[in-house]
Image (cartoon, grey):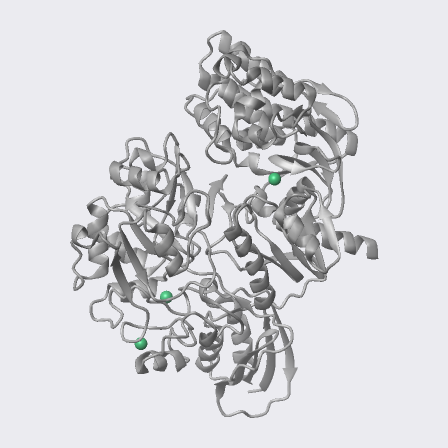
């Protein structure tokens, strides 16, 4: 039979996911000789043998690749056969120059490892740090590249003989799995007392830390648990006292806590889990999934006060699996921090920050290198929708077909910040950094950028930033010694939605959010744009109103109600401040103008008496949505709003508020009013899009901005637009909120450059 030798190049393969051993096993199984190795561009192989066997090899290469490999492209080239005697794995070359291999995201414990974890005969039985090439910590333990054990936080642990044998055996599941370890050589779990509470807790140091920790949780104690990307705070989810204590000690008034359930069945007892949600819950990324809460579950009221949704996640580390099995009921698992500070991830920092909150610490000696919060997702019409893209997804790059002519850094927005470094066809969007308003978050931001630059070998030649001059991300961008390009906030939102769908526009972009700096110096947020990646035009917007007191108007929705309409009920509730606020708005003192849709929701919530002051961003709108949701069957009547023609056209949001007041005066139940208001906003979006279609002859609408996290509004809007024959683009892989802004900024700058070159 004819002998051939073929060179194979595989691009996009992630490091440390067992790709080379897979190639080795595939080739030797087919009786082929040759070699496999990796270099700066990815994995390469040369396979030699009978023509049919080589063809079989190529056919199975992509089909049977390891679960975590992300193959982007396979190319082949014929070589002259050299009669090699065997198949070998070539040593890694030293990694200088451009690095194109990728680092995997942290991945939930795989089925094989779970089987070993539960097997009393296995040497890793109940070992909380079991992992293999198919699962385990990655991004959060990587200190530098190349991705090799000495450059991870596993460096201090010297592999025992048995682990080393597995690590070096190409036929083993742990071949070159950098975090490979076992009870004899790896990290150790321990349960530490809060100083002074020792006797009170009655901890026995000879006891298994998992069992002891589970015992504390079952007795209503609050526990700090070291996870993959930071410390969590845990409490028995069914114990009202424990969850209330956690809330009070953490100074977190209303913002919901997430719950971890042992498995899909346990999750389904707490909330309604449809097929798409189940797929998200069990995916290797294991995000927190927002689900409709089941009435009458045993979850403590304080978990998500007044909330009809519940954030649920499944265990994603062996430690979680063991702990959940030992507690034998769901636990609250929330970021280890105080109020709005970022999640703590260093041991000393955790001891200092969480000492007043946690009764004990379930911790270990494997360091976390990068703070990474849990991701948050939900499904919409059977499709995943990420609301926070972080642990489990980052640093997987988003492939962008149009590409980046020059390496770019995009600094993102202020709230829910992420940054993005991009080059070639890859956009690396960072983990959720948080709100850039304290020194610790700013440090995560600046250190994160340095870390990403090193890991992915990206030396940006241009920096993109928001137009808001006061954003710390903008200030950071302008201080760099690089050409800086401003990108309007809502243009970035729409560009990010386009990128999410692999499109370039032009489209009608509906960007509805809380705050974004406009090109005219006012605050935008209820925008109808025509937008492509490179450019946009403002076709219409909500009629602007003053925000009396600026930031105070965001914290106190009743001020927005006052700015919009003279409602006697709101005036009565706030009679002490009312005249001053009205005067402030009328004279334009400390009252920037805004077309924000978020503020329109705030005003409606205040008028309905839902919320006059908020404890977390978007709270008033969230509660207004939940009020409307209590209705069955759904109310679909919509309040009308007048459109004032012009370029740009304006839509009178105040019309909706007058209708709210009228219905309230007529004694219409509040949930009905809330529903009619939502449908009114959906109807005004429909009206705006019809005008845009007429004017610009565009048939596709992209929806972006944090307001579309509102499911009731989103469903109503999509239904109306589709009924009018529009094609509607929604977010999926990147958040519609400001977490998606950095990707949009990077795309806009790259597209402007491409446009100016052609
Ligand atoms: Zn595994
Ligand atoms: Zn070992
Ligand atoms: Fe925004």
Q: Quadrant of the C terminus?
A: bottom right
Residue drawn 61% across the image and 64% down it: 453
The image shows residue 111 at horizontal and vertical percentages of 34, 62
**Residue extending furthest top?**
666
Residue drawn 64% across the image and 17% down it: 583
Q: Quadrant of residue 736?
A: top right
Does 467 sit above or below residue 178?
above
Depth check: give the residue in front, 428 or 497.
428
The image shows residue 407 at horizontal and vertical percentages of 69, 62
- In this rendering, does residue 423 appear at all? yes
Depth check: give the residue in front, 688 or 182.
182
User: What is the number of callouts on the image?
Assistant: 0
Q: Quadrant of residue 367?
A: bottom left
Q: Quadrant of the N terminus?
A: bottom right
Does 641 sit above or below residue 716?
above
- In this rendering, does residue 499 appear at all? no
The image shows residue 607 at horizontal and vertical percentages of 52, 18
The image shows residue 341 at horizontal and vertical percentages of 46, 47
Q: Looking at the image, in which quadrant does ligand 2 appear?
A: bottom left
Residue drawn 39% across the image and 78% down it: 167
Does 617 sit above or below residue 608?
below
Q: Quadrant of residue 623?
A: top left
Left or right of 306 in this view: 183: left
Left or right of 194 in this view: 136: right
Left or right of 125 in this view: 471: right
């Amino acid at each position: 039979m004819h002998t051939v030798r073929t060179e194979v190049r595989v691009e996009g393969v992630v490091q440390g996911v067992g790709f080379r051993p897979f190639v080795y096993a595939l080739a030797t199984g087919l009786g082929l000789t040759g070699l496999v190795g990796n270099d700066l561009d990815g994995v390469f192989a040369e396979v030699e043998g009978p023509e049919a066997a080589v063809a079989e090899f190529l056919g199975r290469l992509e089909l049977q690749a390891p679960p975590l490999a992300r193959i982007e492209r396979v190319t082949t080239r014929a070589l002259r056969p050299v009669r090699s005697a065997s198949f070998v794995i070539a040593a890694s070359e030293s990694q200088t120059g451009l690095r194109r291999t990728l680092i995997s995201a942290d991945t939930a414990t795989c089925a094989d490892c779970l089987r070993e974890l539960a097997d009393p005969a296995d040497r890793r039985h109940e070992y909380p740090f079991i992992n293999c090439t198919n699962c385990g910590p990655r991004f959060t333990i990587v200190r530098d590249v190349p991705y090799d054990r000495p450059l991870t936080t596993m460096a201090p642990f010297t592999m025992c003989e048995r682990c080393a044998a597995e690590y070096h055996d190409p036929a083993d599941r742990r071949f070159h799995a950098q975090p490979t370890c076992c009870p004899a050589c790896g990290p150790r779990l321990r349960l530490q007392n809060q100083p002074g509470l020792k006797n009170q807790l009655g901890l026995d140091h000879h006891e298994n830390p998992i069992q002891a920790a589970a015992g504390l949780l079952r007795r209503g104690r609050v526990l700090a648990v070291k996870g993959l990307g930071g410390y969590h705070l845990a409490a028995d989810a069914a114990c009202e006292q424990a969850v209330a204590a956690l809330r009070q000690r953490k100074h977190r008034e209303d913002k919901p806590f997430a719950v971890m359930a042992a498995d899909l069945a346990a999750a389904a007892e707490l909330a309604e889990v449809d097929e798409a949600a189940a797929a998200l819950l069990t995916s290797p990324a294991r995000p927190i999934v927002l689900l409709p809460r089941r009435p009458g579950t045993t979850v403590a009221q304080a978990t998500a006060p007044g909330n009809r949704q519940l954030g649920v996640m499944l265990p994603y580390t062996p430690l979680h699996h063991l702990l959940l099995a030992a507690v034998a009921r769901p636990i609250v698992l929330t970021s280890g921090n105080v109020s709005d500070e970022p999640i703590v991830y260093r041991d000393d920092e955790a001891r200092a920050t969480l000492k007043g909150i946690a009764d004990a610490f379930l911790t270990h000696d494997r360091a976390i290198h990068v703070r990474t919060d849990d991701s948050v997702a939900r499904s919409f019409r059977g499709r995943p929708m990420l609301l926070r893209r972080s642990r489990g997804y980052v640093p997987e790059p988003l492939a962008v077909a149009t590409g980046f002519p020059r390496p770019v850094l995009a600094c993102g927005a202020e709230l829910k910040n992420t940054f993005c470094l991009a080059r070639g066809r890859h956009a690396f969007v960072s983990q959720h950094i948080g709100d850039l308003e304290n020194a610790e978050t700013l440090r995560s931001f600046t250190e994160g950028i340095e870390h990403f630059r090193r890991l992915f070998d990206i030396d940006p030649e241009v920096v993109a930033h928001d137009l808001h001059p006061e954003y710390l991300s903008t200030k950071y961008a302008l201080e760099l010694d690089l050409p800086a390009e401003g990108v309007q906030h809502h243009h970035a939102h729409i560009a990010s939605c386009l990128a999410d769908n692999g499109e370039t526009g032009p489209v009608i972009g509906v960007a509805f959010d809380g705050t974004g700096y406009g090109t005219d110096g006012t605050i935008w947020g209820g925008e109808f744009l025509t937008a492509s990646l490179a450019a946009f035009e403002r076709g219409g917007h909500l009629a602007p109103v003053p925000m009396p007191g600026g930031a105070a108007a965001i914290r106190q929705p009743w001020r927005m109600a006052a700015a919009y309409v003279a409602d006697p009920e709101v005036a009565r509730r706030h009679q002490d401040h009312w005249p001053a606020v009205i005067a402030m708005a009328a004279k334009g003192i400390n009252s920037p103008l805004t077309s924000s849709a978020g503020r329109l929701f705030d005003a409606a919530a205040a008028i309905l008496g839902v919320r006059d002051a908020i404890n977390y961003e978007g709270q008033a709108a969230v509660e207004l949505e939940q009020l409307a949701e209590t209705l069955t069957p759904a109310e679909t009547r919509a309040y009308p709003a007048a459109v004032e023609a012009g370029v740009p056209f304006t839509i009178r949001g105040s019309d909706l508020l007058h209708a709210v007041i009228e219905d309230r005066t007529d004694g219409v139940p509040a949930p009905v009013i809330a529903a009619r208001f939502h449908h009114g906003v959906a109807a005004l979006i429909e009206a705006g899009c019809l005008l845009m279609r007429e004017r610009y002859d565009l048939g596709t609408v992209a929806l972006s901005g944090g307001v579309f996290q509102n499911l009731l509004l989103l469903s109503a809007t999509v239904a109306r637009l589709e009924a009018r024959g529009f094609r509607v683009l929604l977010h999926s892989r990147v958040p519609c909120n400001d977490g998606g802004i950095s990707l949009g900024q990077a795309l806009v700058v790259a597209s402007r450059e491409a446009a100016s070159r052609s």
